[in-house]
Image (spheres, rainbow, N blue to C red):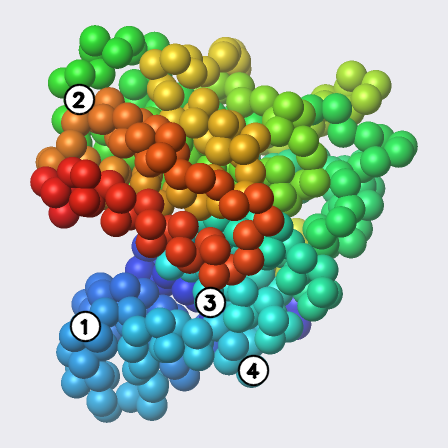
Amino acid sequence: MEQKKIVLLGSTGSIGTQTLEVAEHLGSVRVLAVAANRNVNLLEQQIRRFHPVLCAVYDESAAKDLRARVQDTDVRVLSGMDGLMEAAVLPAADMVVAAMVGSIGLKPVLAAIQSGKDIALANKETLVTAGSIVMREIADNTVKILPVDSEHSAIFQCLHAIGSKNVGRDMQAGDNAGRGEGAVKRILLTASGGPFYGKDRKELQTVTVEQALRHPNWDMGGKITIDSATLMNKGLEVIEAKWLFGVDPEQIEVVVHRESIVHSMVEFCDNSVIAQMGLPDMKIPIQLALTYPRRLDSVVPAVDFTKYSSLTFGQPDRETFRCLTLAYDALNTGGTMPAAMNAANEVAVEAFLQGRLSFLEVAELVEEAMDAHKAINAPDLDDIFETDRWAREFLLEKHPALG
């Protein structure tokens, strides 16, 4: 395999550290730049191990600390959004792995696309907040967008199995997933159900942060794990799937699959269903995004189906876990509503993690912001950023204890 040169945005998070594991395993991936918020200790380790030419640290004081620590190396340490943007457009890079959590990833991803980089996308918020804009830029700049989320990677692979035009054109905008022959009837987006599957609202009133962070199958960062517990993570994936695969919201169905062996399925117009399966390990979709269209040996073991006496499927409880319903509502409203929903959720989840909000109040705050937001139907990028700012300020002004 030819050497691939990547920029890794979000290198200290769960996806970022696993991407580095995969890069080391493959031996054919050169990490030219890493970027993170403020985890200086881990960034220093990554610099000394992978020898990037550039490191971007969003937090200014953390960047200053890191510069002092690695002054004996050749790495350039940049800071702030300007640093992230410079990393994203590094001329020698072929691909940007977008693994940052939150809407902060949108600007660097757009800059990378406009500079001709392929995108390995793990940052859901990029498409949730600005899907139409991002997919238009993907088409205009003729670059690839390859999904890293296990569910979207699974859908991508299912479509590849039937030679969908969508996959053949590297998922550029304006191409419906498999129109005509092999047309997609439904996308079946699987969900583990999180740690509280089967519980009612009364049982969820006393949920602690520690309990919410105990995901049954996946090892993820704090924010994503809480989103999984509220089912907002699945709601964000629904919106992301709409943009990646060009399907209508009513064609995307969430199915609870507790074992997390089937990562998602696609049902076609002849009622046949193709599923993608594997152990719940993010290194599998990360590696495929880095090596596509080739498949190479993985560090992840094969599934031993004799250990699974059954694979179960059920419906999500959208009344108890309101965030999933709110995400569908935001998608159906369109325009800037998903950006408002996402920003409100980021504020609410952070408050919950800090013990300032109860578990059930996360959905309540998101709904409050959505009810107050007047969506702009055909937003430009400024409208998206203004909506993000408005939603955060709206909640913090109404609920000062959140800040």
Q: Which residue matches tag 2? A: 207
Please say whether residue 49 is visible from this viewpoint.
no
Q: How far apart are the alpha carbons under marks 1 and 2?
A: 33 Å
- Above or below 375: residue 112: below
- Above or below 171: residue 139: below
Under mark 3, the amino acid is: Pro
Nearer-N-terminus badge (1/4): 1
| Front label number (3 vs 1) | 3
Q: Which residue matches tag 3? A: 108
Q: How far apart are the alpha carbons under marks 1 and 4?
A: 26 Å
Q: Which numbered disc covers residue 92? A: 4
Nearer-N-terminus badge (4/3): 4
Under mark 2, the amino acid is: Val
**Residue 146: image location, x then y, percent:** 61, 53
Q: How far apart are the alpha carbons under marks 2 and 4?
A: 48 Å
Element at label 3: helix
Element at label 1: helix
Q: How far apart are the alpha carbons under marks 2 and 3?
A: 36 Å
Q: Which numbered disc covers residue 248? A: none
Under mark 1, the amino acid is: Ala
**Residue 116: image location, x then y, percent:** 64, 73
